[in-house]
Image (cartoon, rainbow, N blue to C red):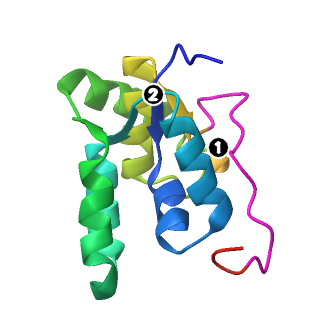
Amino acid sequence: MARDVVILVDSDVLIAHLRGVAVARDWLLNVRSRGPLTMSVVSIAELIGGMRTVERREVWRLLASFRVEPVTEIIARRAGDMMRRYRRSHNGIGLGDYLIGATADVRGLELATLNVRHFPMFEHLQPPFAITDGQPPGE
C-alpha cells in the first residue's frame, strides 16, 4: 500500500529503537520501506541531549537517515497557539512537544509518537506500535 503522507517520527520512537526495542526497529524498517521519514529539528536536540556515549555513532547514523524539518516562524506561532489552548488542561507538555506537534500540523505530516497524551491537538492520534511492560530489548 502506497503512503500519501510523510511521517514525522517523534523522539520517543527513535529512543525505543536505539534502546533495542525490536517492535520499534521493525516499525521503522516497515514504514521506511514505503517512503522517506522526517523528524523535527527539536528531536535532534532531544536525542543528542539524552544519548549515551556508546550510542554516539548509532545516533549520528540514525539522524543522517531522516529528512529534518526546521522550526519556522509559522511553526513557532502555531506552537504558541497550541500552548495557549492546552497548557491549563494538559499539564506536563513541554515546549518541544508543542513545536513537534505544530510542525506536523503546519507541514501536513502524520505524527508517530508513543506519548499521545502530549499531543491533545491530534484528537485520534494512536501510537504506531505498543511496547509491552517488561519487554526486553531485541525481543
- Which residue is denoted by mark 2 in the rendering? 35
- Based on the displayed image, in which of its 4 quarters is residue 47 positioned? bottom left
Residue type, numbered disc 2: Gly
Please, what secondary structure does the residue beneath circle 2 have?
loop
**Membership of 127 in magenta stretch:** yes
Q: Position of residue 139 (x, y in %)?
A: 72, 73
| Residue at (51% x, 35% y) in the render | 33
| Image-quadrant location for residue 76 | top left
For residue 125, above or below residue 29? above
Q: What residue lies at 54% left-to-right and 48% top-to-bottom?
A: 28
Q: In x, y percent, where is residue 99?
A: 36, 39
How far apart marks 2 and 1 lie (CA) works out to 36 Å
The stretch of residues the image draws in magenta is 120-135
Kind of residue at disc 1: Ser
Q: Which residue is mark 1?
A: 89
Is 101 drawn above or below residue 115 in the view shown?
above
Residue at the image position 35 percent from the left and 74 percent from the top:
50
Please, is residue 12 above or below residue 5 in the view?
below
Side of 126 relative to 114 (left or right): right
First of labels 2, 1 by sequence position:
2
Q: Which residue occupies 64% across, 74% down?
A: 138
Q: Is residue 31 visible?
A: yes
Horizontal side of residue 46 vs 98, given as left or right: left
Tell me if residue 118 can be seen.
Answer: no
